[in-house]
Image (cartoon, helix red, strand yellow):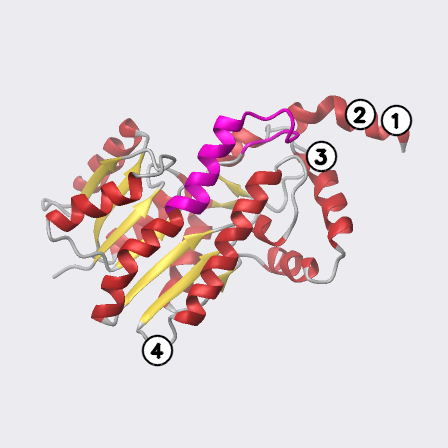
Amino acid sequence: MNKVALITGAASGIGLEISKLMFRDNYSLILIDKDASGLTQVQSSFHHHTNNNKVRILVKDLCKPNTAEEIYNELYEQDVVIDVLVNNAGFGILGKFEETDWQQESQMINLHVHTVTHLCKLFLPGMISRKKGKILNVASLASYYCGPLMSVYYASKAYILSFSVALSNELKGTGVGITVLCPGLTRTAFQKSMCEEKALIRWNIGSAREVAKYAYRSMNNNKLIAIPGFFNQFLAALSRILPLKVSAWMIRKLQLKNRVNKFEKERKEEEIFQ
C-alpha cells in the first residue's frame, strides 16, 4: 500500500512543492488549505498524471482551535493512517505590535502554535505504535531571532523550532523522525504579501521548489534541523553569538530595508537622524 502524507498549506508555495515531490515518490496525499480554489487546481493537476484517487483535498481553516481534531476524527473514521505529517501552513503580520490587529495575531498564534502542536499530539501516538513515521514542521530562520515589526510571527516560529527539537529528543529509539525546516526569505505568496518587488534586499531569496527539495531530502535523511543555504546557516549560527538587543536592532534594520512600502516613512526618518 502507498504511504500517506498529510500536508497543510498545500495550495501554494513550499507546501505545494513538497506535495509534488511526495506524489512523485508514490505517496497518497491529503492536502489541506483554506484556499478551496487553489486546492482544487492542485488536485486537478495531480489527477492529470494518474487515474487513481491518490490525492484528496480538505478545505479547512487551520487558524481555528478545533480544526486539528476535526481533521483527525474525519480521517480516523475512514481508517486513514498517516505516515508523514507536514505542518507547513503559516502566515505573517507586519507592523508595530500596538498597531497590528489582535484577531489576526490570535489566528496566527493558533495556527503556528496550537494547530501544529495538536496535529502532532493526535497523529504521533499512531506513528509510535507502528514504530515508523515522520513529521516535518516548517519554522523559519526567524526562529533564531527576535523580530521587531513582526514580533509575534518571529516568536511563534521560535516555538516551532524549540518544540520540534525537544520532541525529537523524546522520540529517540521510537522509529519516528522529526525534522524542522528553517528557511530564509523564499519566493512564496507569503513573501509577496510582505515585500514589494522594489524591496532593497533580494539576493538571498530562495525558490519554493529548492527549499522544498532541501526539506524533503533532509526529512528522508532524518536530519533534525534543516536550514537551506550556507548564508542562512551562517545567520542561524550568528544568532547564538549576538546579544539579543543587538540581534533585535539588526532585524529591525533589515525589516525597514526589505518591507519598503509599509515602512517607507519610518525608514526615511531613521536615515535623517543617522
What whole-number distance in Å separates the C-alpha atoms at marks 1 and 2?
Answer: 6 Å
Residue contact between numbered discs 1 and 2, judged by CB atoms under 8 Å: yes
Q: Which residue is mark 4?
A: 173
Q: Amino acid at mark 3?
A: Lys
**Nearest to viewer (mark 4 / mark 1):** 4
| Structural distance between the alpha carbons of marks 1 and 3 | 15 Å
Q: Which residues are magenta?
A: 93-115
Percent x, y for residue 125? 26, 63
At label 2, counting other C-alpha atoms closer than 10 Å, the crowd grade (few under 14, some 14-19, many 20 or more) is: few
Disc nearest the viewer among 4 and 3: 4
Where does the image place residue 82, in percent across and percent down from the top left? 22, 56
Dot 3 corresponds to which residue? 257
Callout 1, which amino acid? Ile
Of residues 227 and 213, the one drawn nearer to the viewer in this rendering = 227
Q: Nearer the viewer, residue 256 or 229?
A: 256
The main secondary structure of the magenta stretch is helix
Q: Is-magenta flag for residue 132?
A: no
What residue is disc 1 on?
272
Give the image location of residue 21, x and y in percent: 31, 53
Residue linked to disc 2: 268
Q: Secondary structure at mark 1?
A: helix
C-alpha span from label 2 to label 3: 10 Å
Q: In the structure shown, which secondary structural element does the residue marked by tag 4 occupy?
A: loop
In the depicted structure, whether residue 115 falls above or below residue 232: above
x, y percentage for residue 2?
Answer: 16, 59
99 in the magenta segment: yes
